[in-house]
Image (tube, rainbow, N blue to C red):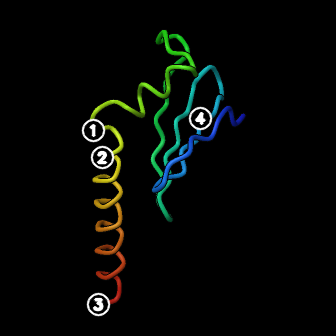
Amino acid sequence: MRLLKTFPHERYLIELHHYNQKYILKITLEDYSQSFRIAEMDSFSADKIDEVLNYDGFLGNCLTRFLSMRTDLSSALNSMKK
């Protein structure tokens, strides 16, 4: 997997990778990460990634999923302690 670009952001680590004819947008917050795979065939190019990141609600929705991921893991770990 080849790292194409890292995007500056105050909250997230945002990276764009390329692997097997796919772009992989990876967004990381603390111990959690989300990956979005976009096929080259989908008329997508790496220079359009800024449009995706600036799309209304995209990063906000990522934050909502990160919070849900943390809640799910905490609940699972807490249930094991009982």
Q: Earlier in the sequence, mark 3 or mark 4?
A: 4
Q: CA distance from mark 3 to mark 4?
A: 41 Å
Residue 53 vertical placement versus 26 (above, below)? above
Disc 4 crowd, CA 10 A, few/some/many (<14, 14-19, 20+): many
Q: Secondary structure at mark 3?
A: loop
Q: Secondary structure at mark 2?
A: helix
Which residue lies at the image location 65% right of the left edge and 35% below the top edge? 5
Q: Which residue is mark 2?
A: 60
Question: Which-is-in-front pick, marks 1 and 4?
Answer: 1
Q: Which residue is mark 3?
A: 82
Q: Earlier in the sequence, mark 2 or mark 4?
A: 4
Q: Earlier in the sequence, mark 3 or mark 1?
A: 1
Q: Which residue is mark 4?
A: 16
Residue 59 appears at what percent x and percent y?
Answer: 36, 43
Disc 2 crowd, CA 10 A, few/some/many (<14, 14-19, 20+): few
Q: Which residue is mark 1?
A: 57
Question: Which-is-in-front pick, marks 3 and 4?
Answer: 4
Location of residue 23 by image quarter? top right
Q: Earlier in the sequence, mark 2 or mark 3?
A: 2
Q: Secondary structure at mark 4?
A: strand
Q: CA distance from mark 2 to mark 3?
A: 34 Å
Number of marks in the image?
A: 4
Residue 54 appears at what percent x and percent y?
Answer: 38, 32
Residue 24 appears at what percent x and percent y?
Answer: 55, 33
Question: Which-is-in-front pick, marks 2 and 3?
Answer: 2
Q: Relative to the observer, which residue lies in front, 51 or 65?
A: 51
